[in-house]
Image (cartoon, helix red, strand yellow):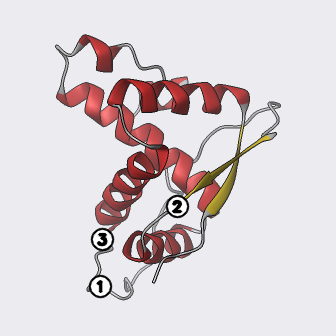
């Protein structure tokens, strides 16, 4: 059973970052997002067999995108498998962040982590993400 596609709103800067990441990684956006959401959910302690965490986080989730005055006007549709959708729903409820912001934050953090893991890969190093993600871990 497939999950319905998720529609997220992105700013022009976020859209450029996502397009470049798809191009450099040669992945469909849905596949990139699935990997990123799964990794972020796992870091929070969510796995397929972990229904709920006992405690709420003590501080806000650090990877929420900073939107400033820039308007999120573009819509992007992403297909996620049912397992990733379940992880997304539980993780976003846990950190009290909307799905769109979680998807974006997780994806940008994932790209930065890839860059860090492969410092000699020129293509990966050419990826640009919002400054917030380059400066924190």
Q: Is residue 103 above or below residue 124?
A: below
Q: Quadrant of residue 14?
A: top right
Point out the tag, 3 or 2, that comes first from the N-terminus: 3
Q: Is residue 40 above or below residue 67?
A: below
Q: Is residue 13 left or right of residue 43?
A: right
In percent of the image, x 43 and y 43: which residue is there?
Answer: 28
Label 1 sits on residue: 50
Q: Is residue 32 left or right of residue 10?
A: left
Distance (Cα) linking label 3 and label 2: 23 Å
Considering depth in this image, is 27 or 13 the residue closer to the camera?
27
Tag shown at residue 45: 3
Tag shown at residue 96: none
State the residue lying farthest toward the front. 1
Q: Quadrant of residue 78?
A: bottom right
Q: Circle 2: is it few (<14), some (14-19), or many (20+) Cα within 10 Å?
A: some
Residue 135 at x, y percent in the picture = 43, 25
Distance (Cα) linking label 3 and label 1: 8 Å
- Is there CB contact under 8 Å for labels 3 and 1? yes
Label 2 sits on residue: 79
Point out the tag, 2 or 1, that comes first from the N-terminus: 1
In percent of the image, x 63 and y 32: which residue is there?
Answer: 15
Q: Circle 1: is it few (<14), some (14-19), or many (20+) Cα within 10 Å?
A: few
Q: Secondary structure at mark 1?
A: loop
């Amino acid at each position: 059973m497939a999950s319905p596609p998720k529609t997220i709103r992105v700013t022009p800067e976020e859209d450029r970052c996502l397009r470049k990441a798809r191009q450099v990684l040669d992945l469909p956006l849905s596949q990139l997002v699935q990997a990123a959401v799964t990794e972020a959910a796992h870091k929070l302690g969510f796995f397929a067999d972990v229904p709920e965490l006992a405690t709420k986080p003590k501080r806000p989730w650090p990877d929420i995108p900073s939107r400033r005055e820039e308007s999120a006007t573009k819509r992007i549709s992403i297909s996620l498998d049912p397992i990733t959708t379940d992880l997304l729903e539980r993780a976003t409820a846990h950190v009290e962040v909307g799905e769109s912001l979680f998807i974006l934050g997780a994806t940008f953090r994932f790209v930065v982590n890839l860059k860090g893991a492969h410092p000699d890969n020129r293509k990966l190093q050419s990826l640009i993400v919002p400054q917030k993600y380059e400066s924190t871990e």
